[in-house]
Image (cartoon, rainbow, N blue to C red):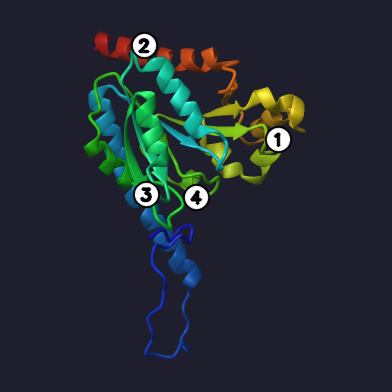
């Protein structure tokens, strides 16, 4: 049950034998429960980081609204890198293994998490997924979160980098409407740039809006379809593995 965002997996249908004449401070109770849930999540996130650190593996949490192109981005990234790098993927969706099957076909091992009525992944779910994935030394761990720009912002999954993906079909003002997600991301991918001639979207205005929320953020402008700008994204990923591996060898 996710009480912090209201996506409860069960409905409140049982009858109460008592009347509700006495006072409930539901606001305070909700805040305390939210704090407890997030504190427990942070403990699981810390454990996830320890698992990855022991393997010298890097985790990336991909967040976005539905239809931004996260799965296609991962497919193309895996296809380009899996010959030289080990990649595993945690897939989050409410139902089905459609995306996990796409990821497997692209060349990576995937574990599907179906969240049911819940609208995000949490660190406990991801830690359970790690138990089913053979995470190798110096590997990439890609986490594709449920398509949602609100709830996933609250939950640390133990990732090294949080990647917010926005497509040019969504509107360049979306970061201002959903600031928490872009505040908690350290990287933004502006996807589907091949469609810029056909939509009313300004990359410059989008970047300006994001920088109003967080200044220290990196950007990649790319098209998964045409691969324009894709090398910059791939080069950054591989540089991270090289950097971490070099640091580990020095210790």
Query: Mark 3 and mark 1: span between their CA atoms?
Result: 30 Å
Tell me the mark number nearer the camera, choosing from 3 and 4: 3
Tag 3 and tag 2, C-beta contact below 8 Å: no
Q: Which of marks 1 and 4 is nearer the N terminus?
A: 4
Q: Closer to the N terminus: mark 4 or mark 2?
A: 4
Counting from the top left corner in percent of width and height, residue 204 is at 72, 25
Earlier-in-chain disc, 3 versus 2: 3
Residue 170 visible here: yes
What residue is rendered at 30% in x and 33% in y? Answer: 49
Q: Position of residue 47 (x, y in %)?
A: 27, 39
Q: Mark 3 points at which residue?
A: 114
Residue at the image position 44 percent from the left and 26 percent from the top: 75
Residue 171, above or below 219: below
Q: Which residue in the protein does label 4 denote?
A: 151
Quadrant where the image shows the N terminus: bottom left
Disc 3 versus disc 2: nearer the observer: 3
Mark 1 sits on what residue?
Answer: 172
């Amino acid at each position: 049950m996710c009480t912090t965002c209201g996506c409860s997996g069960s409905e409140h249908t049982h009858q109460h034998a008592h009347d509700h004449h006495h006072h409930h401070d539901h606001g305070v109770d909700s805040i305390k429960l939210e704090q407890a849930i997030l504190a427990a999540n942070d403990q699981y996130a810390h454990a996830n980081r320890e698992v990855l650190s022991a393997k010298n593996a890097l985790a990336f949490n991909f967040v976005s609204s539905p239809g931004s192109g996260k799965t296609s981005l991962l497919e193309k990234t895996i296809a380009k890198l899996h010959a030289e790098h080990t990649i595993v993927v945690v897939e989050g969706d409410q139902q089905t293994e459609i995306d996990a099957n796409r990821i497997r076909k692209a060349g990576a091992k995937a574990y599907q998490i179906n969240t049911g009525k819940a609208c995000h992944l949490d660190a406990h779910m991801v830690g359970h997924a790690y138990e089913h994935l053979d995470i190798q030394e110096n590997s990439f761990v890609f986490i594709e979160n449920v398509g949602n720009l609100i709830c996933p912002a609250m939950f640390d999954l133990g990732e090294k980098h949080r990647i917010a993906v926005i497509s040019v079909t969504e509107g360049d003002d979306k970061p201002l409407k959903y600031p928490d997600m872009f505040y908690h991301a350290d990287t933004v991918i502006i996807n589907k740039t091949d469609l810029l001639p056909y939509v009313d979207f300004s990359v410059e205005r989008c970047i300006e809006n994001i920088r109003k929320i967080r200044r220290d953020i990196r950007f990649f402008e790319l098209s998964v379809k045409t691969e324009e700008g894709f090398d910059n994204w791939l080069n950054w990923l591989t540089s991270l593995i090289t950097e971490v591996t070099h640091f580990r060898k020095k210790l």
